[in-house]
Image (cartoon, rainbow, N blue to C red):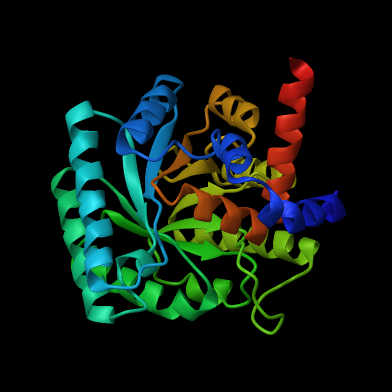
Amino acid sequence: MAIFDRALVRLLPAVPKPVVQRLSSRYIAGPDLADALRVVRELNAAGKAATIDVLGEEISSADEARAIAGQYHDVLAELDAAGLDAGVSVKLTGLGLELDYELCRDNLEAVVRDASARGRFVRLDMEDSSTTERTLQLYRLLRDEGHANVGVVLQAYMRRTLDDIPGLHDVRLCKGIYIEPHSIAYRDFDEVRKNYVRALETLVAAGARIGIATHDEYLIQQAERIVREAGLNADRYQFQMLLGVRPERGDELVAAGHPLRIYVPFGTQWYEYSIRRLQENPKIAGYVAGDTFRRVLGR
């Protein structure tokens, strides 16, 4: 199956844009904030929380970075107006991290303060290894300033992850999707799984609040075991999944009494996001293709 997934990814640039849009429509709320709010409302009705992600990472000016920050302020205001159960996730490159550290810090602090005033949570997403140290630095800075409504992401395939855990209060743990050299990242599938479990157990022992972000059935079952054995209350953990990926499994987790959060991306850069994410994570491409085939055969 891994060979099929990688072969599928190599074909993506040749796929017509309307076809990519059709395939990705289940995994991206749409181009507008109204689309994201509609999806969040449906998720909330099904007993699931949500996190909204504004698409837009490859910015080239300070004005673009401020514009993305402005979109997050709009998201927070509309979530309040609609009374929905959702927070936001930000990619620091979209707020200007690669242009100017202080620009990014100013944009981020403004979003975090706005979210705090509204009782909303902000997740600092993790990108490739060139941003890891600065992302953790900004997270720790915000927490030291008293912003308890901010969390960060750790990637289990990074060799440094276990060393990064001490002092972290709220962590979303995922496998990681960026292509990194073997010297700093595990590349073997089983090694990544093993480090994920080790990191999850370490986070539990450290008393952190944990977002268990995975669609891997083995890791879901391991996480259920760890949560059960540690006797964690629902305020200490939640499972997290991407919109449209294994939704039936998500329903099962909710039915079993686990809290579940769904990541809901939206924005005009849906095409760039779709191609990049599928190329970075061939396994997701396999999920998309398999789901599409099942829907076609089902009809």
Nearer to the camera, 189 or 68? 68
* x, y percent for residue 206: 47, 62
* Left or right: 120, with 27 as reference point: left
For the point 35% across and 64% down, the residue is: 94
Q: Vertical placement of 221 versus 93: above or below?
A: above
**Quarter of the picture holding the C terminus:** top right
Residue furthest bottom in the image: 183
- Marker count (numbered): 0
Residue plotted at (36% across, 26% down): 38
In the foreground, 50 or 288: 288
Specify the farthest residue to the top: 299
Relative to 132, residue 287 above or below: above
User: x, y (%) of residue 13?
Assistant: 67, 56
Q: Position of residue 67 (x, y in %)?
A: 23, 59
Residue at screen point 64% across, 26% down: 248
Residue at x 67% of width, y 65% of height: 195
- Res. 204 visible in picture: no
- Examine the image and state in which quarter residue 16 appears: top right
Q: Nearer the viewer, residue 5 or 135?
A: 5
Please state the horizontal and vertical placement of residue 82, each as a whole percent of the image. Answer: 22, 27
Asked whether residue 56 appears in the rendered view, the answer is yes
**Residue 24 versus residue 196 in the image, above or below:** above
